[in-house]
Amino acid sequence: MSIAPAQHFDAFLGSFNQNGKQAGLFAYEGASTLNMKQYAAELRSRDQVLPKDIWIFVGSEGGYSEAEVLRMQNLALHPVTLGPQILRVETACMALVSVLKYEFDLMS
């Protein structure tokens, strides 16, 4: 697992899935009904193997604009919810990585 340095939103989106073998999600406090467990199950059923890379997008305080959400969805990034509570950025990052590691048995 690697964590990339902060980048401008446009540059980051432009670098996503250039090889066609990446999956991605973004934490979204809006009208997303897909949770992390469901997202992991969807990845397993679709690909049978763990994608080479899973990109996680976590926005800054205030969340994403509607235009940003549409751009990410157009790139096949999936909005996921972390429940009804709004987490701090650093907490959301740890929660997302922890759930993915658990769901794909990467804890050992």
Image (tube, rainbow, N blue to C red):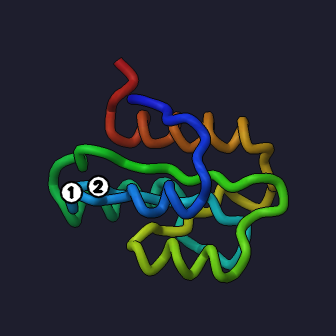
In this orientation, which residue lies closer to the viewer: 24 or 105? 24
In the image: residue 104, left or right of residue 63: left
Q: Percent position (x, y) of residue 107? A: 39, 24
In this rendering, the answer to whether 3 lies above or below 69 is above
Amino acid at pointer 2: Gln
Answer with the quarter of the image where residue 103 lies. Answer: top left
Q: Secondary structure at mark 2?
A: strand
Amino acid at pointer 1: Asn
In the image: residue 27, left or right of residue 11: right
In this orientation, which residue lies closer to the viewer: 105 or 70? 70
State the residue position of label 1. Answer: 19
Q: Secondary structure at mark 1?
A: loop
Q: Residues within 10 Å of mark 1 (few under 14, many from 20)?
A: few
- CB-based contact (under 8 Å), mark 2 and mark 1: yes
Q: Percent position (x, y) of residue 31? A: 68, 78
Mark 2 → mark 1, Cα distance in angstroms: 7 Å
Please give the name of the residue rendered at 56% of the width and 35% of the height, measured from the top-left corner: 5
In the image: residue 19, left or right of residue 108: left
The image's mark for residue 22 is 2
In this rendering, the answer to whether 89 lies above or below 20 is above
Camera-near label (2 vs 1) is 1
Q: Percent position (x, y) of residue 37? A: 47, 54
Please give the name of the residue rendered at 47% of the width and 68% of the height, measured from the top-left corner: 78
Answer with the quarter of the image where residue 62 lies. Answer: bottom right
Answer with the quarter of the image where residue 15 lies. Answer: bottom left
Location of the C terminus by quadrant is top left
